[in-house]
Image: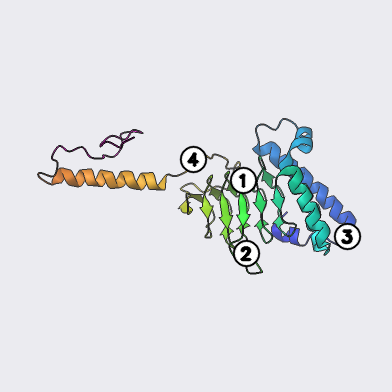
């Protein structure tokens, strides 16, 4: 179910709404079985996955919010927070197949929008960066993966099939099929685009080291230039580009 379909979720057709709710529950359970190797059976997921319970309670609070039962909606969202450790504002729009893995510490703000088949890990914040009313929280496209501890702030858009590295701080929009790492988040376009038909992109070890690669290239360039200048090398130890994973050179005083 798309974000637009969630926005139009029937408020005055209870039976139709209940059927859609249980259809999304089945989709949510299937998404956990697909993305979490620790999940053994659908029954275990149904009974014991707090991230999933937080999403299901949010869907009820969102329904109440749309019917202008705002106090009841906020009350239910706070109960969900106490029970699961996940805080989702009842006005937030959540698509089908949303999976919060190890959900403790997750915060989803009021005007946040989350597409279909999105995965986020613990301690993720979809937060605001303004005190003004209106849209001030992020929009996540379909199949986005957000690593543990990442902060996505402001009314920005994370394009579909993108991956946000653990502990990244993202404050500007990200094109589709990108990888973001660092503080502030640096955007790297994928050399091999992730397709909707591909398996979920959960390989958190495959993250670019932008600063490290740049530094190594600069040191290689310095070595090459020094080799061309007569008398530049006087025997004093200095820092060279690493051989493999090991840095050698001057005393780092450690």
**Quadrant in the picture for residue 114:** bottom right
Q: Residue furthest front?
A: 253
Which element is circle 3 on?
loop
Percent coordinates x, y for residue 88 in the rendering: 71, 53
In the picture, measured across the screen, residue 186 lies left or right of residue 7, that is left
- Which callout, 1 or 4, points at the residue further toward the start of the chain? 1
Image quadrant occupied by the N terminus: bottom right
**Circle 2: element type:** loop
Marks 4 and 2 sit apart, C-alpha to C-alpha, by 31 Å
Taking the view exactly as shown, the residue that stands out farthest to the left is: 230
Residue 99 visible in the current orientation: yes
Q: Mark 2: give few (<14), some (14-19) or many (20+) Cα within 10 Å.
A: many
Q: Earlier in the sequence, mark 4 or mark 3?
A: 3
For the record, the magenta segment spans: 234-254
Horizontal placement of 243 versus 192: left or right? left
Residue 159 visible? The answer is no
User: In terms of secondary structure, where does tag 1 sit?
Assistant: loop
Find the distance from the CA under tag 1 to the CA under tag 4: 20 Å
Which residue sits at x=59%, y=47%? Answer: 145
Task: State the quadrant of the C terminus.
Answer: top left
Numbered disc 4: secondary structure: loop
Residue 75: assigned label: none
Q: Give the residue pinned by disc 1.
A: 123
59 up-or-down from 111: above or below:
above
**What residue would you read off at disc 3?**
13
Tell me how far mark 1 sits from mark 2, CA to CA.
20 Å
Count of marks, rendered view: 4
């Amino acid at each position: 179910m798309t974000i637009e379909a969630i926005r139009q979720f029937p408020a005055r057709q209870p039976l139709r709404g209940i059927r859609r709710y249980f259809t999304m529950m089945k989709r949510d359970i299937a998404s956990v079985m697909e993305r979490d190797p620790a999940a053994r059976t659908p029954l275990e997921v149904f009974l014991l996955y707090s991230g999933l319970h937080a999403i299901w309670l949010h869907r009820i609070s969102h329904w109440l919010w749309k019917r202008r039962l705002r106090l009841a909606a906020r009350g239910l969202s706070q109960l969900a927070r106490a029970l699961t450790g996940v805080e989702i504002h009842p006005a937030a729009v959540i698509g089908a197949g949303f999976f919060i893995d190890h959900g403790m510490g997750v915060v989803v703000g009021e005007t946040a929008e989350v597409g279909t088949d999105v995965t986020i890990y613990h301690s993720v914040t979809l937060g605001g960066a303004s005190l003004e009313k209106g849209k001030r929280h992020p929009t996540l496209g379909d199949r986005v993966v957000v690593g543990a501890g990442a902060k996505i702030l402001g009314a920005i858009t994370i394009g579909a099939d993108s991956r946000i590295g653990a502990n990244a701080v993202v404050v500007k929009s990200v094109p589709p099929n990108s990888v973001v790492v660092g503080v502030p988040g640096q955007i790297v376009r994928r050399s091999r685009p992730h397709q909707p038909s591909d398996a979920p992109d959960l390989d958190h070890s495959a993250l670019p080291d932008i600063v490290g690669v740049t530094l190594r290239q600069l040191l290689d360039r310095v070595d090459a230039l020094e080799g061309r200048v007569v008398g530049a090398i006087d025997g004093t130890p200095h820092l060279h580009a690493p051989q493999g994973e090991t840095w050698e050179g001057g005393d780092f005083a450690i």
